[in-house]
Amino acid sequence: MITELFSTTVLIGILASGIRLATPYLYAAIGETFSQKSGVLNLGVEGQMLLGCFAAFYVAFTTGNLWLGVLAAMIVGAVMGLAMAFVTVNLHAQQGISGIGFYLFGLGMSDLLFQRLMGTVETVKGFQKIYIPGLSDIPGIGEILFNQNILVYGAYLLVPIAWFVLNKTTLGLKIRAVGENPDAADSLGVSVAQVRYFTIILGGTLSGVAGASLSIALLNVFQQNMTSGLGFIAVALVYFGAWKPVGVLGGALLFSMVNSLQLWIQVLGIPVPSDIAVMMPYVLTILVLVATVSRVRAPSALTKPFERDE
Amino acid sequence: MLKTRFGGVLFQAVAFVLAMSFVSLILVAVGASPLEAYKNMLTGSVGSMRKLAEVLVSFVPLLLVTAGLLLTFSAGLWNIGVEGQIVLGAIGTTWALRYFVDSTLPPALIIALSILAGMFAGALWAAFAGILKTFGGVNEIFGGLGLNFVSTALTLYLIFGPWKREGVASMSGTEPFPDIFSLPQLPDLRISPWALGIALVAIVVVYFILQGTYFGLRIKAVGKNFRAAYLLGIPTWQYSLYSFLICGALAGAAGALQVTAVYHRLIPSISSGYGYLGLMVAMLINYQAIWAVPVAFFFAALNIGSIQLPIVLKLDSSLSGVLQGVLVLFVLLMEGVRQKFVKKV
């Protein structure tokens, strides 16, 4: 039985689904990286994702247009981001608590809308795998990397883009400056409020897409609380990745590969006790925790509201 | 006037009205009657003695968690790991009950020891977050989140592994304990007066610690200005840890009572989100212990009152979550507005 796990087909299957499963973590965690880089801890990711899940599913289900679904999820995420930005930037609210407020709101609201507008669990034909001539035919690698749906490609494309924006553009410089030393940035004429509005709304939008990737690309169904802690893991991944897009990618891949392995072990009926299999991704979180004790320095102004000294 | 306590209450009242209006708008938008919904929530929570007892069952863990969080907040700490501390309390208590279940000790003593074991386990879990924070430089929010996941994993592992039910393990939890190991309840009502008593004592003790002791003063000093407190000779890291430990013990007590007074076994979602809710209550009352009882009661009533909504109005009980979330956001909003006013006046 256990040898089955090491056959080429299964290995390819594990890697391919690991790549796929990392998608929602990537969107959410890259978005969170932007807001944390600018000094804002957004704990509401989970709530934004859940509403994104529902919006995408509902719109795709009723209109039959998946892209409209993604757009709806982005708008919902952006609106929640806008509200979050207003509360944290203008009103100097404690970021942790407003985040949890948005989490509870999203959790309840997505469920409420689901009950009122749909009532029963439905399925939708989500984004299909895209065949890329040439690349998809490469043995092994083609199956793992180039036989995925469009939202998966988008997630991986986001990593170099985020890296480039954060490290090579003026905008990235402003974001980092605002997160490290808002007073200095302010005195140089950078609008702290503007930059933070931008990053929080961007984070919300990407969390919305993360939700859409779950409900109309990976699972193709909506259920209440279907993210079940995924958004909080995304927040932890930002920390694990030391606020670097590439680090976040590493963390998301590690987490999803183990999750994928766990799922395949159950599918193949390999006699690993089910309690061990269920625990595997969580055990990984312990390792993440231990690994992150290596004191990577957080953006200095993280969680601190900015106020100009008069 | 805005600076006075009355001004604060006034703004909170406005926030409450705005939150209710906002939720009403949502209800109208999805085609439900807000009045009917609120009426049902009211009768569903305080409409009868039985419902009231249910509210108190939900009130006990919420109040205990809030009491603990008042200390960590006062010390300037974000103990988001409180959720895991509740879970560990439940695990510790279950462990002790399993250990003593065949012993000849009197059941009352066994229950007391088990609750203490839960408090100890909660404190231990909080100590992890505290040590990571004070010695590892790990932000307590991240450490706490990680530890929350680990505690969930541990619960699942125990329920599906070593503490498996005879026959098949299931999400319904471990084998229930015999009735003699439950805290006595009022006749025909689910609430145990002992549990209620413990929660009320806890909030009173926390109130006095914060208002009337040197210890509480030092904790507050650490929270207000860590560096100044350090320079004044307060062993700051010790006081940070103390506040973590006490909060963990109280959260552990909440978990312990979930086992001994409510579920009589360990279930996967034993913390039921009381940790996050407690964070909101503590923040809503602006860290003033005196308001903890009414606000925690109100939140508990929202929880219980919304349970019958799906049956009557085809509205999900998730409405309570929406209401609680919106309420917190509007209180934050009004607090921000008030700060602006205060500065201008």
Image: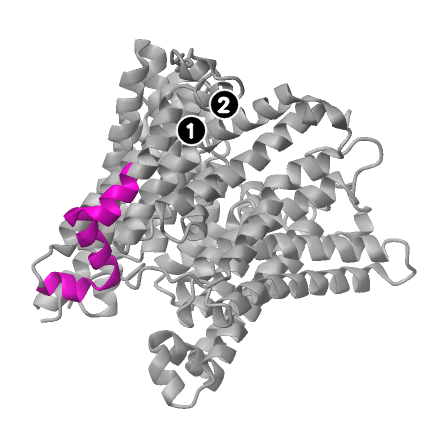
* Residue name at image x 42 percent, y 23 percent: A215
Specify the label residue A227 is tagged with.
Answer: none
Residue range in magenta is A161-187
- Left-right relation of B108 to A28: right
Relative depth, front residue between A290 and B310:
A290
Marks 1 & 2, CB-CB < 8 Å contact: no
Q: Position of residue A172 (x, y in %)?
A: 21, 49
Residue A204 percent coordinates (x, y) = 29, 38
Indicate whether residue A261 is drawn in magenta.
no
* Mark 2 Cα shell of 10 Å, populated few (<14), some (14-19), many (≥20): some
Residue A174: in magenta span: yes
User: Which structural element holds mark 2?
Assistant: helix
Image colouring: one colour
Relative to B198, residue A28 above or below = above
Q: Quadrant of the N terminus of chain A?
A: top right
Q: Amino acid at mark 1?
A: Asp
| Depicted A28 relative to depicted B85: above or below | above
Residue at x 76%, y 28% (from the top left corner): A2
Image quarter hosting the C terminus of chain A:
bottom left
Q: Is residue B270 above or below residue B107?
A: above
* Residue where numbered disc 2 is placed: A141
Q: Amino acid at mark 2?
A: Ile
Within 10 Å of disc 1 (Cα), the crowding (few <14, some 14-19, many 20+) is many
> What secondary structure predominates along the stretch shown in magenta?
helix
- Judging from the image, mark 1 belongs to the subunit labelled A
Query: Where residue B72 sits: x, y (%)?
Result: 46, 68
Q: In this orientation, which residue lies closer to the viewer: B15 or A156?
A: A156
Q: Which chain letter goes with mark 2?
A: A
